[in-house]
Image (cartoon, rainbow, N blue to C red):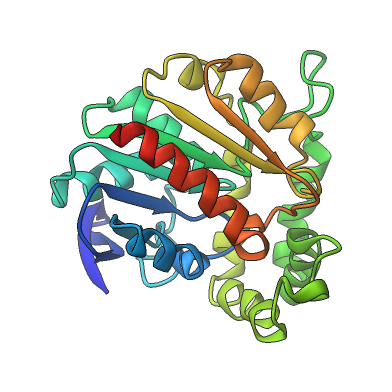
Amino acid sequence: MLFVTAGYEDGAPIRIAYRDQGNGRPVVLVHGYPLDSRTWDRLTPVLLAAGHRVITYDRRGFGASTRTAGGYDYDAFAADLAALLTELDLRDAVLVSHGSGSGDIVRHLHSLGCGRAAGAAFLAGLGPHLLLTERNPHGLGLGRFDQIISDALRDSDAHLHEIRRDYFSAIEHEGGRLAPEEFDAFLTIAASVSPQVHSAIVPSWITDFRGDYAALTVPVLIVHGTDDRLLPLRGTAVPLYELLPRARYLEIPDAPHGLHWTHTAELATALLGFLARLDG
């Protein structure tokens, strides 16, 4: 992997690890919790075969990137993404996120500008505001976030097994959607991240992104699975589409949160179609 320095913590560089493959319009893939850039190993070959340049990277604290003591908020994540885009001098890039990586993209586009981006795709994303409120009755209560933090610190192995169960919902390895070794690979990747990082990132998920999304000027694709048990679509994708009615919106029937693993073909069709329209 290659590295870009995104900043410094106590005088030491914060290094973001990335891979840059192929040619054509750049597509930057931003992974979510609790994995790293290897989460895109199924989708990357499809994008490369379609003639795109694909950039994947490990968010700070994950994979081969620097494990910082702090900075697990969306201003920092957005700045890390900006550092990568600037280092590679990317133009007309399409930014694609999964899960909590959606916040990196929308905060970057709102606070740091859309000058290098031609479009954004949010796959199983957080939505405008994940927190349960009177105006967001399908959100998650504060107690749920506190429980995730407690579980990650108290028994990391049990926590990751629970997350894996909900990540793939009822699919798991049924019907050939997911080979047993891929199902096991989830734990291998997730366990490489420290429990401290697993817990430190959780408070960022209650960030209110409504203003960020409302300010977007680039074309947007929203894709969500109907069986997403970690980020159910009624509290995430549906309110996001209400906020961005001109976006392209797709629900994939029976797809879980890890739809980029279990429903790669359906997801690739939607994403490649979105990219083609940008090119056309």
Tell me which residue sits at (24%, 52%) in the image.
Answer: 6
| Residue 179 in the image, given as x and y percentages of width and height | 69, 81
Please determine whether, in this image, residue 146 is positioned above or below residue 264.
Answer: above
| Residue 74 in the image, given as x and y percentages of width and height | 45, 38
User: Is residue 259 or residue 104 the one in the foreground?
Assistant: 259
| Residue 152 in the image, given as x and y percentages of width and height | 71, 63
Q: Is residue 4 visible?
A: yes
Please determine whether, in this image, residue 237 is positioned above or below residue 137.
Answer: below
Please determine whether, in this image, residue 93 is positioned above or below residue 259.
Answer: above
- Give the position of the C terminus as an image quadrant: top left
Tell me which residue sits at (38%, 41%) in the image.
Answer: 275
Q: Tell me if 78 is positioned left or right of 164 in this view.
A: left
Q: Is residue 74 visible?
A: no
Number of callouts in the render? 0
Q: Tell me if 222 is positioned left or right of 75 in this view.
A: right
| Residue 70 in the image, given as x and y percentages of width and height | 44, 51
Tell me which residue sits at (74%, 53%) in the image.
Answer: 255
Residue at the front extreme? 280
Tell me which residue sits at (81%, 48%) in the image.
Answer: 227
Q: In which quadrant of the rendered view does residue 194 lie?
A: bottom right
- Give the position of the N terminus as an image quadrant: bottom left
Please determine whether, in this image, residue 119 is positioned above or below residue 175.
Answer: above
Q: Tell me if 71 is positioned left or right of 262 in this view.
A: left
